[in-house]
Image (spheres, rainbow, N blue to C red):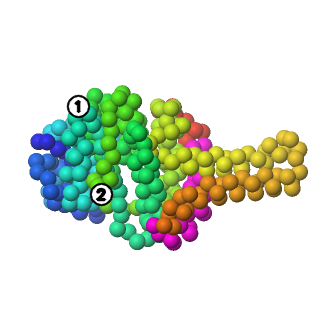
Amino acid sequence: MDVSVIIPAFNSKDRIGECVKSVLKQDFKNFEIIVVNDGSNDSTAETAKKAGAKVFSKMNQGPAIARNFGAQKATGKILVFMDDDCIAEKNWLFEMMKPFEDPAVAGVQGAYKTRQTELCARFSQIEIEDRYDRIHKAKKIDWIGSYSAAYRRDVFFEFNGFDSSFPTASGEDPELSFKISKEGHKLAFNPDAVVFHRHDLSFKAYFRKKFFRAYWRILLYKKHHDKIVSDSYTPQSIKLQIMIFALMLLAPFCAFIFGTGIAFLAMIELLFFALLFAATLPFTAKAMRKDFEVGLVSPPVLIGRSVVFLIGLVAGTLAGVWRK
């Protein structure tokens, strides 16, 4: 077997069948589909098996361990990972394999698209496309997300797969690619290797996801201090926005300590807010060129994202996530 497609699934009876069928329709030969039923209490296993996948069931331990379990069961020389809420384009697997024609390539990142029409989903899609723009410009790629990822089998096991100290989908995928990249292995991005994803439908769900991403980012940065400064995926504007909002929160304490007046504090806060708003404008302009309505909501959403990110980072630090 040349290729193994591994899909972790938890309580996904309503989506795993469509996901598996999309992989079976690939213009590609000699591959297997493995679904790891991660302790589901619904008919996920039966649905996946009926759709045509090999199914292995285990107790619920999170996606990192589920993917590693699937990799151990796999026979392919290339291990391909996707999420159970994704639908693969017909040429997805072919495009995922293209970069491996270069023997130096150890891992490949594919791309998200969406067919959703909801405003939040459209915002999320443009947000991730902004990150793809950053990857395109990077001299060296160090970030691979597991929603559309592939690794050479020997490299995957050399680095012991995904780090099981991440209990949820929370940074275990870039943690692996960071390690592989640091050892000099080449990673590649193919934007033509597309899976369609179901983004959050509401901004409430979007902000909740961002909170937990930031919460567990403390653990990721503990393991890779150098990535606090920069990686090939995370726009620097996000860090700038978080820093500006943090300064807005600190300003009243500084004003109290130094005894400045209310008028001076108000002027400083207004200045920080203006800087925060200005920091959202490059993304806003890009979004407006693609989707005017998304562009209009971008400034408040990005400011809200900064607030949630900072709260998540503080919460993760106080909770001692870094001790794992």
Q: What residue is rendered at 53% in x and 58% in y?
A: 283
Q: Which of 109 and 307 is in front in this view?
A: 109
The count of marks equals 2
Q: Name the residue under label 1.
A: 154
Give the left or right position of residue 18, taking residue 32 as reference.
right
Image spot of residue 36 (x, y percent): 24, 47
Q: Give the mark nearer the N terminus: 2 vs 1.
A: 1
- The tag on residue 195 is 2
Magenta stretch secondary structure, dominant: helix
Q: What residue is rendered at 71% in x and 49% in y?
A: 249
Q: Distance between the residues labelled 2 and 1?
A: 25 Å
Image spot of residue 21 (x, y percent): 19, 60
Residue type indicated by callout 1: Asp
Give the left or right position of residue 192, taking residue 76 as reference.
right
Provide the secondary structure element on which disc 2 rests: strand
Q: Nearer the viewer, residue 310 or 145?
A: 145
**Residue 271 occupies which quadrant of the picture?**
bottom right
Q: What residue is rendered at 35% in x and 32% in y?
A: 180
Residue type indicated by callout 2: Val
Q: Do the residues labelled 2 and 1 touch (CB within 8 Å)?
A: no
Provide the secondary structure element on which disc 1 rests: helix
Q: Is residue 192 above or below residue 221?
A: below
- In the image, the segment drawn in magenta is 290-315
Residue 39 in sight here: no
Give the left or right position of residue 43, taking residue 112 as reference.
left
